[in-house]
Image (tube, rainbow, N blue to C red):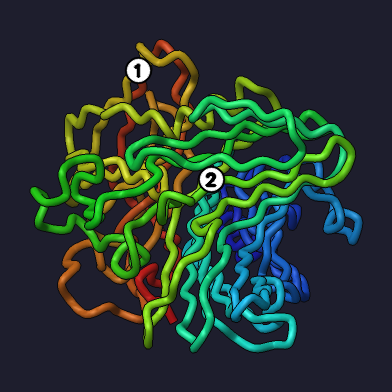
Amino acid sequence: MKIKLFIITIIITMFNINPSQGLSKDRAPVIHIGKYHLLSCGHNSVLLDESRGLSMDILTETKLANWTSQVIKEKYLSLTIKVELDNNGFPIQLDQAYDSNPRLQIISQGPNQVAARIFFSLYSQDEISYGTGTIDLYIFDGRINIIPSIFIDYKEKLKIFRAGLTLTLPAGGNRFEIKNPLCKFEKEMWIQKFGEDRARFELSLENKAGQKAIIGWLRNRYPKFLYLREIDQDPQKDKLYEKWPPWISQRGPQFGWKFNEDSALEGRTPEDGPWTLNFLWVSNGCEVPRGGYQAFNSPLVIALGKTESEVEMNWESYSNPKKPVAIQGDFRFYNEIEGVYEIDSKGKPLEVIFDGTENLTDRQIVARIWNFKGSGGYEFKADGQPVLYSLLNDGDLIDDPMVFIKKEATGPARQAIVSFHLPKGKKIKLKMQATAGMQLTYQMYSELETY
């Protein structure tokens, strides 16, 4: 009996579950059932369909009460990668969904985050491969960060006519507004170019059920070299990596949706039928370098919520970060690819103040704290109250980015993902300290492995 109670205590501690709410399977961060994979955090869930290249559906909280075939059929919006090639005037359609043998790799999971990578090939309908792709997913409560990346191989006489990420919404009662750049459309078919390199993009959506979202990114085109030491500073002055930069930023053109001057959002928004929004790197053709490939890499963030104010809070939390003040430890930078504050604990107790006194909305704070030492327990509190956290081990890649990549992460926790609510008009002091106890650490798959 004591052994059984001990095991239950471990499960409750690891997933931060309230025992009175039960251990229902829909609360697990990752669920695999047949060809479907459900990745969840808080009110957000992403459903991946292995029979369709792991194309994704965004589900709402109300669809997670029970796991049934009806749940799988009902969705808020769907996303898939699509490419159209031109073979001397004859179109060839490629779709992520044509790959019947994709691969899903869970990078990390916990009570307040899920990270994963999708691997797929870009096939035509006659099962000929013309390239490969990945999609990185970072799922938090109220926000999903999506990073699509594709590589189109060179083939004689072929060029790329269109390439991008297609988002679809079920028919009926949908509304949208492009807030940045501000514009309006009266036709059912339209196209809007992305604009200046440093400009952000922001699109608000609402479906017939009143579910709301903001979709966008902070820069149309990122600097040529994306360093993460100070991601918003001049990259030429930051020669040392704080940690490895995203692998997607190290090959191909500059990171971002603005591949060329024709990059744009194309919409088909009929009054009664389903909607299609195409986020296009290429809308009017481009060549593939002879003997090589053409690469496209971009970030896309989806902020979700039941109300307009909740969506605005989740979007502001990501898009308008405020620098915290470190009393103990060292705040290093805001990582806008994942939307997390990066903090070095230096292997000691941590104390950081997040100031929301000038914020117009509440904020959801997500911080990655690293350089942990030892193998005991850890305690995280915001103004004295326990907060959600995940203990992770990434193979010590943060300590020295110039060593060879380790395929297997092993050992005690080296970092944590911490999340908490910051009310507008208030300051919150986040404290971390080591305690006596047992450590439950997720052994991560390396984000740097691309195979």
Quick one: quadrant of the C terminus? bottom left
Residue 100 versus residue 160 in the image, above or below: below
What residue sits 45% from the left and 30% below the top?
317
Residue 58: x percent and y percent? 70, 50
- Mark 1 or mark 2: whose residue is earlier in sequence: 2
Q: Kindly identify which residue carries mark 2.
A: 140
Tell me where residue 67 sits by quadrant.
bottom right
Q: Is residue 323 visible?
A: yes
Mark 1 closeness class: few <14, some 14–19, many ≥20 residues within 10 Å: some
Q: Looking at the rendering, which quadrant does residue 208 occupy?
A: top right
Considering depth in this image, is 425 or 192 the residue closer to the camera? Answer: 192
Q: Which one is in front, 57 or 27? A: 57
Residue shown at the point (73%, 68%) measured from the top left: 49
Is mark 1 in CB contact (under 8 Å) with mark 2? Answer: no
Q: Secondary structure at mark 2?
A: strand
Q: Name the front one of labels 1 and 2.
A: 2
Residue 379 can be seen, yes or no: no
Residue 427: mark: 1
Mark 1–mark 2 distance (CA, rounded to whole Å): 22 Å
Q: Position of residue 447 (x, y in %)?
A: 39, 68
| x and y, in percent, of residue 179 in the image | 54, 26
Rendered image: mark on residue 125: none
In the image: residue 10, left or right of residue 407: right
**Relative horizontal placement of residue 189, taking residue 382 as reference (left or right):** right
The residue at 18%/55% (across/down) is: 242
Compared to 376, does 158 lie above or below?
Answer: below
